[in-house]
Image: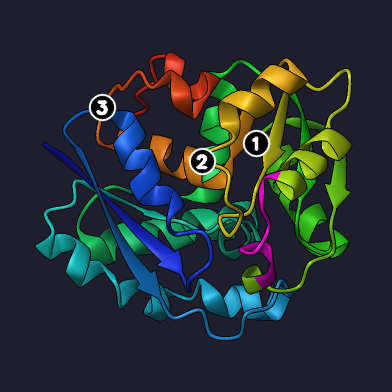
Amino acid sequence: MTALGFLYPGHSAEDDYPRIEQLLGSDIRVHLVHTDIGEDAHRVDALLEMGAPARLAAGVQELRHAGADAVVWACTSGSFVHGWEGAHEQVRTLAQAAGMPASSTSFAFVHAVREVGAGRVAVGATYPEDVARLFVDFLGAAGIEVTGVRSSGIITAAEVGTWGEAEVFALARAADAPDAQAVLLPDTALHTAAHIPALEKELGKPVLTANQVTVWEALRLADRRVNAPRLGALFTREPIVQV
């Protein structure tokens, strides 16, 4: 059995994780620990505090007790807001605290984009425009070209968590562009696990969503390969194992 550990901020779309575990259909176990979100705000100062080392370290003991093989900070904005170098330092500190391989959803997007072979991507962000632009900068630091970004201007994760299928599809459609080779939906507060194949069928390209890539990243860290087409194109390829 492979046990995957996730630190998830607050309560919004955490039910994506047991759904993904079920869709993986193998001996994969998902262990999710909720971290203290602090102020629920897609605002730079609040996001920096949300991903502070003490907040993340508070959850790692429970994951160790669960026998997790790897841990991912399941928050995109709470990682890319630190910038490319700061996000690396965040992950290094988390790995030291947890005593296991670690990553974050922001790096999960970078690795997943490379895995599906996309050089140019479109971004559909729930965040305010200034926060969405920080994600674009993060992708740019990884050498990923962003064809455009659609910002929904939502301040709280709680509001994002209320979105259903109609809102998710509308965001993806609005973000897509003809020259984009993949569409990215970067908020882990957004319910997407049930919609990925239908999104990809409609848009005709890979769709990478936050909770999807977060689980894929944990599998990559644990050196597991799982074929699960109901989780989209990303799960129909063998992940690249990076040392």
Q: Position of residue 215 (x, y in %)?
A: 40, 41
From this view, report whether residue 214 is shown above or below residue 219.
below
Q: Which span of residues is magenta-colored? A: 159-165
Q: Position of residue 29 (x, y in %)?
A: 21, 44
Residue under label 2, please give it.
193
Q: Amino acid at mark 2?
A: Ala
Q: Residues within 10 Å of mark 3 (few under 14, many from 20)?
A: some
> Gap between marks 3 and 1, in whole Å?
24 Å
Comes first in the chain, label 3 or label 1: 1
Say what secondary structure mark 1 lies in: loop
Comes first in the chain, label 2 or label 3: 2
Residue under label 1, please give it.
142
Residue under label 3, please give it.
224
74, 88: nearer the viewer = 74
Say what secondary structure mark 3 lies in: loop
Q: Amino acid at mark 1?
A: Ala
54, 201: nearer the viewer = 201
Q: Is residue 34 visible?
A: yes
> Gap between marks 2 and 1, in whole Å?
25 Å
Camera-near label (3 vs 1) is 3
Q: Amino acid at mark 3?
A: Arg
Q: Residues within 10 Å of mark 1 (few under 14, many from 20)?
A: some
What residue is rendered at 53% in x and 66% in y?
12
Q: Are marks 2 and 3 in contact (CB under 8 Å)?
A: no
Horizontal arrangement in the rendering, residue 99 relative to residue 90 (left or right): left
Q: Quadrant of residue 202?
A: top right
